[in-house]
Amino acid sequence: MTPDAPTTRNVPALLAGLHTEKATATVLVSGTPGGAIHVRDGMVVGMETPGAPGVEVLLLKSHRIAEEDWTAVRATGADPARVALELVAGGLLGAAELEITGRAALFDAAFALALTSPDGWEVTAPRSLLDTGTAVSPDRLVTENARRLRLLANERGATARFARDRLEPAPEARDPRRVARLSARHRTVLTAADGRRTPRDIAFTLGRGLFAVLLDLRDLLAEGFLRSPAAAPAPRPSTAPRTSPAATAAAPHPTAAPLPRRKR
């Protein structure tokens, strides 16, 4: 399928068609950030995108799963689809908690993909993914994305720009008494917002969803703890002489001529 097909004018329309057909496939989305959408029997069961943390990042960065335990399960050679089941079977994670984490990662990935228009997409045979037991209809994803965009800005372009901003601490952030009144969650986000990280970077650093991080950044911005990076100062007008160096060298200096002598 290509973007030119009348029934696939966009990715939501494509997913709606796959839902109607009860198809099982993987949709590869190209562009920035791009990613993969996994569909089983017409339901969306997972998404992977560099634009938002996935299940693995959420579990490891939050320290819900120790990295050595995760590595040990992966080292058994289990298919990626069975890694989650191995975690549950080994008592490292509850089935309900796994599904909640998978659903959160799915909605967050859908939100990240919705911020920009894709370059294109391709429907391929189903590919392996970390199976968390999550299954969401395409209509539910569209509704949730619309809700999140409304909460942040009312305009997709404005939210997309906000998601690329590298916010930096404002003078208020240096007031320890004011910072102490923030919640622990907001203090953690404030520390991570150093002027170099984008919201996506902060989400991956903290192991939190992109949307949740954007909400916290919006709060900190409104309270004056953060600000957009200072604009580069405008170049000062040149004060150099408008004559060429050669012309300047050729013109005699006013003091170069001899002073007139006084005659009696």
Image: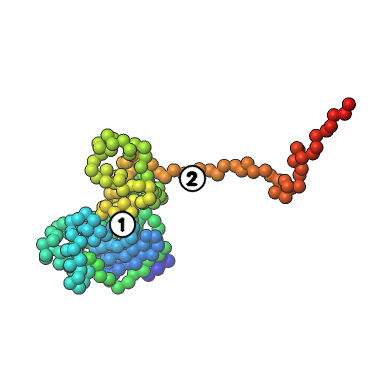
Residue 138 vs 187, above or below: the answer is below
Q: In front: 86, or 147?
A: 86
Residue 215 vs 7, above or below: the answer is above
For label 2, the residue is 232
Way the structure is coloured: rainbow
Q: Amino acid at mark 1?
A: Ala
Q: Position of residue 147 (x, y in %)?
A: 30, 48
Return the residue found at the far right. 264
Counting residues from the start of the chain, the first of labels 2 and 1 encountered is: 1
| Residue shown at 38% from the left, 47% from the top | 195
| Residue shown at 29% from the left, 54% from the top | 205
| Residue shown at 38% from the left, 42% from the top | 227
| Residue shown at 39% from the left, 56% from the top | 116
The mark closer to the camera, 2 or 1, is 2
Residue 19 quadrant: bottom left
Residue 36 vs 224, above or below: the answer is below
- For the residues labelled 2 and 1, the Cα–Cα distance comes to 30 Å
Quadrant in which the C terminus appears: top right
Left/right of residue 70 with respect to residue 163 in the rendered view: left
For label 1, the residue is 52
Q: Position of residue 35 (x, y in %)?
A: 33, 63
Q: Position of residue 146 (x, y in %)?
A: 32, 50
